[in-house]
Image (cartoon, rainbow, N blue to C red):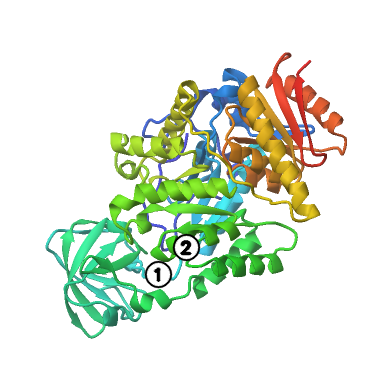
Amino acid sequence: MVAKYKKDGISSGAVDCGLADPAVSGTSGSDGGNGAAAPSRATGLASSFPSIAPGIDVDSVSEAELKENGFRSTRRTKLICTIGPASCGFEQLEALAMAGMNVARLNMCHGTREWHRGVIKSVRQLNEMKGYSVALMMDTEGSEIHMGDLGGVTSQKAEDGEEWTFSVRKFDGALPEGTLQVNYEGFAEDVMAGDELVVDGGMVRFEVVDKIGPDVKCRCIDPGLLLPRANVTFWRNGRLVRERNAMLPTISSKDWLDIDFGISEGVDFIAISFVKTADVIKHLKSYIASRSTNRQIGVFAKIESCDSLKNLEDIIRVADGAMVARGDLGAQIPLEQVPSVQREIVTLCRQLNKPVIVASQLLESMIEYPTPTRAEVADVSEAVRQRADALMLSGESAMGQFPLKALSVLRTVSLRIERWCREQKRHEMMRLRELSPPSSDRQTAERVSEQICNSASHMANNLGVDAIFVYTRDGHMASLLSRCRPDCPIFAFTDTTAVRRRLNLQWGLIPFRLDLSTDMEVNILRTFSLLKARGMMNSGDLVIAVSDMLQSIQIRKIP
C-alpha cells in the first residue's frame, strides 16, 4: 500500500519522502489512499519481477500492454510528472511509473539539492529493480522576478481587497504579516502606482497602490492561492513592463550551481527557464560538453516569454527540444494568443525534429479535486491531436491531492484521442521540410537516413504493418521516425541505457536495450526470437525494419 502523500511544502527541503529503503517497498495499486487504482494489467507483472531478460530490456508496462491488447494499443504521447511532496516516495514513484510516467521532472525552484538527490537515487533504483526506463529532467529556476519562500509555509490565500506588501528587504526572522519578498532589487524602482502585478501566470493579481522605499503597497484584485517562488510580472496600461528586468541574465548564479548538480548527477535533460536567445543555449551546451565528456544531456528551451517568441526558430534549432510553458507565457502575451502560439511551437518543433512538451495547468483543478473539468480534458485532447511529444503535470503531481488520478486522466485521454484520430483519419499529413540539404558527405548520409525514415513511415501506413523496428546506437534514426508520426508503434532498439531513457520522451517510441550486432540480419532474427519468447509478438506479424548502422529498409513477416 502506498503511504499517504505528505502535504508539507518542500521549499525547506525537510520532507520525509521514504527514500531510505526502496528494496522493501511494495507495488501500489492506489493513489495514496484516495481510491485511484493503477492499471491492473501491469500490476502483477511490474511488481513480481523486472522486465529484464538476457539480451533485452523493456519497460514492464509496455510489455504488459503489448501482450494484452496488441501493437495498436500502445500510447504514443509521453507523460512527464513533476516530483514533489505528493509523489517523492519510492512506492509513489513506482505507482506513477506503473501508471505511465515516462519522465520525472525535478523543479529546482523548490527543495534542496540533497532532497533532489534522494529523488534521483530512487528513480534510478526503480529503473534497475523494476526494468523501467524513466528519464530525469532538471528544470532551472531562471532569473526572472520571483516571490520568496513565504516564510516556510506551503501557501497563503490572498482575498479580494486585502492589502499586501511586496518588499525587496531581507528579513532576519519571520516575515511580517501580509508581506511577500521579491528577489529583484530593482522591483520597487520599476513599478508605479496603478500597475497590475500578475502572480503565477495570473492565478492572483494585485494593483499597486503606493511605494514606500523598498516596499510596494498593493491591493488584491483577483483573489487566489499564493505559492512559494511564484513568478511575478507587472503590466502598465495593458502592456507588459520589462525595463530593467529585461537585462537580467537568463541563467542566474543559482542556476549555474543547479546545472553543475545536474551534470554531476547525470540527469538526462536540463530545461532552461526564460530563454531569450539561441546564444544562451549554445553557451550552456558547450559548458555541459566540457564537463560531461562521457554522457549526453539534452538541453530543452522553455518558451515562456516575449523574448522567446521573437527568436523562436533560432532557439529551437540549437536546442535539443522545447517546452511550451503556458503559465508564464500567458502572463506575458494576451491569453487569447496562447492556443495559437502553442500550435505554432508544436508544429515548428516537429518540422525541425525537436521533441516538444506541452506544460502548465493541464489539469490544474486536480490539485484539489479528484475529477478534472471538461474544459481541461478538451485542452489535453487538443495537445494530443496536435501530436506534441509529451504532456507535463506540474502542481498536480508535485503537491496535489490526487497525483496518480491526474496521471491516469492524461493516460486515458491520450489513448482515446490517439485511437480516435487513427480510426477517423483525423491526423494531419504534415509536409515535412528537409532537415539535411546535400552539401557534404556527412549531410548526404543524414539525408539518406531521413529519406529512409520518411519512406518507412509512409509504407507502414499504407501497408498497415504492426510495428516499425529501428536499430540505432545514438537514437537519431528513431527520432526521425518519431517525427513522421506513423500510425503504428516504433520499437527502438539501442545498446545503451542512457539512449534508451532519452528516447522515452519522444512520441511513439517504445525503447528497448539490446546488445546490437554489426550484422543487421543477426539483429532482426535475434529480436524476433526474443520478443516471441516473451509473448510480445506472434508468427505472421508484419514489421518494417530500418537501421542507422547499415542504412537499409526491410519488410519482414515474423516466422
Q: Residue 426, percent across and down?
A: 45, 28
Which residue appears farthest toward the bottom when viewing the image? 213
Q: Residue 458, percent across and down?
A: 63, 29
* Label 1, residues with CA under 10 Å away: few <14, some 14-19, many ≥20: many
Q: Are marks 2 and 1 in contact (CB under 8 Å)?
A: yes
Earlier sequence position, callout 2 versus callout 1: 1
Residue named by callout 1 = 144
Which residue appears farthest toward the left when viewing the image? 161
Tell me: 32 left or right of 490: left
Residue named by callout 2 = 273
Q: Which residue is at 52% across, 58% downward?
A: 313
Question: Number of numbered discs present?
Answer: 2
Tell me: 17 left or right of 527: left
Residue 430 seen in this snapshot? yes
Q: Secondary structure at mark 2?
A: loop
Q: Which residue is at 42% across, 58% downward?
A: 10
Q: Residue 360, percent across and down?
A: 39, 50
Residue 109 seen in this snapshot? no
Q: Which residue is at 22% across, 65% downward?
A: 238
When asked about the image quadrant of residue 62, the answer is top right
Q: Which residue is at 65% across, 69% downward?
A: 287
Q: Amino acid at mark 1?
A: Glu
